[in-house]
Image (cartoon, rainbow, N blue to C red):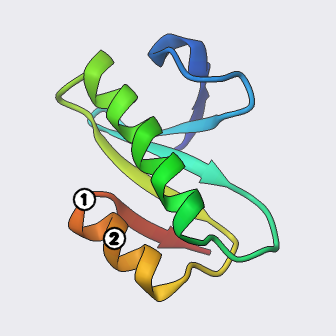
């Protein structure tokens, strides 16, 4: 069961969509049709770092409906952010 979380709780901009996957996992949700490229990946990593600063014991994942560039997917996974497509 997923619940939305107010992004202000982690000090993120109000346009950021967050979902609570479970007690220790938060998803950054990106619902769009255009491909997620490296510039987006850097922004997602910055948001994940902000979440880790506010709550160090939380795992961050990216949940998206958009295709993710292979280089960006590798960059995020090497940084500890799992990508969930669907």
Q: Residue furthest front?
A: 39
Q: How many numbered callouts?
A: 2
Frontmost residue, 34 versus 39? 39
Q: Residue furthest bottom?
A: 70
Q: Residue furthest right?
A: 33
Q: Secondary structure at mark 2?
A: helix
Residue at image coords 24%, 59%: 79
Left or right: 26 in relation to 58: right
The answer to whether 52 is drawn above or below residue 78 in the figure is above
Frontmost residue, 34 versus 2? 34
Quadrant that contains the C terminus:
bottom right
Disc 1 + disc 2, Cβ < 8 Å: yes
Q: Secondary structure at mark 1?
A: loop
| Residue 64 pos. (x, y %) | 62, 64
CA distance for labels 1 and 2: 6 Å
Q: Residue furthest left?
A: 57
On the image, numbered disc 2 is attached to which residue? 75
Q: Which mark is residue 79?
A: 1
The answer to whether 86 is drawn above or below residue 58 in the figure is below
Badge 2 density bin: few <14, some 14–19, many ≥20, Cα 10 Å: some
Is residue 67 at least partly visible in the picture?
yes
């Amino acid at each position: 069961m997923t619940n939305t979380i107010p992004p202000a709780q982690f000090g993120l901009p109000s346009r950021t969509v967050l979902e609570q996957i479970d007690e220790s996992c938060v998803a950054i949700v990106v619902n769009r049709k255009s491909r997620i490229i490296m510039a987006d990946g850097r922004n997602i990593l910055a948001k994940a770092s902000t979440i880790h600063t506010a709550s160090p014991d939380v795992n961050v994942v990216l949940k998206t409906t958009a295709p993710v560039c292979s280089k960006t997917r590798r960059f995020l996974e090497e940084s500890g952010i799992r990508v969930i497509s669907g």
